[in-house]
Amino acid sequence: MGARELTLIGAGLAGSLLAVLLSQRGWKVTVYERRGDPRIKGYESGRSINLALAERGRHALRAAGVEDAVMRQAVMMRGRMIHGLDGSLQLQRYGRDDSEVIWSVHRADLNITLLEAAERAGATIHFHRRLHTVDFDAGYARLIDDRDDQPHDIRFATLIGSDGAGSALRAEMVRKAGFGERTEFLDHSYKELTIPPTADGGFRIEANALHIWPRGRYMCIALPNDEGTFTVTLFLPNQAAPGSGDPCFASVRSGAEVRALFERDFADALPLIPDLERDWEQHPPGLLGTLYLDRWHLDGRAVLLGDAAHAMVPFHGQGMNCAFEDCVALADAMDAHVGLKDAFAAFEARRKPNAAAIQAMALENYVEMRDRVDDPDFLLQRELELALQQRHPNRFVPHYTMVTFMRTPYAVALERSEIQRAILVAATRGRRDLEGLDWEALARTVHEQLPVLEGAG
Ligand code: FAD
Ligand code: 8R5
């Protein structure tokens, strides 16, 4: 083995992007991926799964030279389209104009674009290689080909774990050194359903929005795909609160029960999902949780990033965006430090507080999406938030803007959002509109409590 060799585990979103960034910097990168090559036809399950791409993710794609290729098939989402129980529709913009939007992209297409860029940059990718066990002291790892259960042993100098929420490398690092691993599962899960295109290939509902059906303790969402479909995700509690009569995964089991639920709670969506019963019965509910670790690296021998280091609940649409930001931060740390141990320590020190902040904000955004978006108090606070941004554009930057349209460190965004929330709540308490607000007093508060934010304006 020569110097500057790295072994990545997992060629998902973070692994394939990191392979590009490190190959560009002259590292000899070898990647092992459990699954087969997604470029081979017939591999895909056939379902379109899409993700919301925001500025942090776009910035990393730009660094890897693939932003334009990805954006060509992306669908713009200007805001939240709120579906009321009575079928009413309301678009709440995410930003000030069409420069502040998020983008729906296909996971499989994005992954293929990144794999191709990684190979072009010089990385070697081996498919059908699942990490099984690691001997860190001897520098050996065992990989399994799940097609024939055959083991393949490799030597390594350094392992990078981009193998996702169920990371096998993390399990091996935890087995060797502890790391204080804990997962907090949410007592809610999700199901994916599909809205097909119209007969002439068009979208059945507004294409350029992220649709939300907020229903208090649960919700449905839908993201557009460029071929005219929508992926719908229903989030429900596993068990209903006693006496609430809420739907939950324990009570909605059959196709007939899910139809009854949609008739009652999502009536406008029901006619859009022709395969509701089949979609429901074919796929098990997805689990939701937050993974916390005390450490992400084992001296210079192994480091974790992305979901392997800090899996989060999906409600801010930032899991991939954060994983991509990790890739840039790790590559930067490896540029800035001669030894990998120091580079990994610097990466961990920089990213761990930020990962913890987005994990917390993602949990909070579930309550906002399912329960607050159609509440008059919330709408008035949002109106004031925008008015204060207009008056103090480099100090009062809306929470969603800092997380989604800027690269303000997540921990800074969280801290400033808490101060801003307190200002918004205090100024709107007991009010129905912004008439007669004391704008001068508010300006003083903003100047006292919120220093100028870099990059805002
Ligand atoms: P992954 O992309 O999961 O990649 C891990 C890779 O490692 C996979 O290819 C896997 O096959 C491979 N692997 C696993 N185990 C092994 C092993 N033992 N050996 C070798 N290889 C292995 N994020 C957003 O920002 N916006 C969104 O809108 C969004 N929507 C989402 C929708 C869904 C349905 C889900 C499930 C997640 C969503 N996320 C979203 C989160 C996002 O998908 C993840 O945060 C992101 O994929 C993390 O990247 P990763 O590379 O760490 O993990
Ligand atoms: N992930 C998302 C947002 C925030 C939207 C807003 C929320 C589904 C499993 Cl739940 C969710 C967002 O605040 O108005 N942006 O992008 C993506 C989301 O869920 C994804 C599709 C998902 C994991 C299932």
Image (cartoon, rainbow, N blue to C red):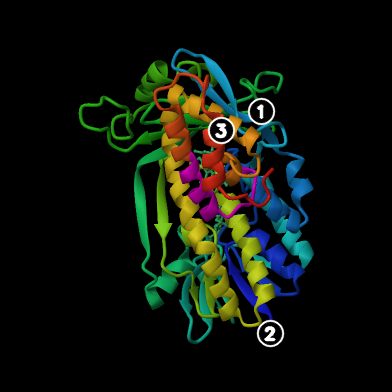
Q: Kindly state the secondary structure of the residue where label 3 is placed.
A: helix
Residue receiving disc 3:
440
Q: Position of residue 415 (x, y in %)?
A: 49, 50
Main SS class of the magenta portion in the image: helix
Q: Kindly state the secondary structure of the residue where label 1 is placed.
A: loop
**First-in-chain label (2 vs 1):** 2
- Could one spot residue 259 in this view of the protein? yes
Residue receiving disc 1:
208
- Residue shown at 49% from the left, 14% from the top: 87
- Residue shown at 60% from the left, 41% from the top: 401
- Camera-nearest residue between 31 and 423: 423
Q: Amino acid at mark 3?
A: Glu
Q: Position of residue 268 (x, y in %)?
A: 50, 16
Tell me: residue 210, above or below residue 292. above
- Camera-nearest residue between 193 and 34: 193
- Left/right placement of residue 257 relative to residue 134 reads left
Q: Quadrant of the C terminus?
A: top right
Q: Amino acid at mark 1?
A: Asn
Per the model, the C-alpha gap separating discs 2 and 1 is 48 Å
Per the model, the C-alpha gap separating discs 3 and 2 is 62 Å
Which region shows up in magenta?
Answer: 404-420
Mark on residue 3? 2
Mark 2, Cα crowd under 10 Å, few <14 / some 14-19 / many 20+, is: few
Taking the magenta stretch, the answer to whether it contains residue 152 is no
Q: Position of residue 153 (x, y in %)?
A: 54, 78
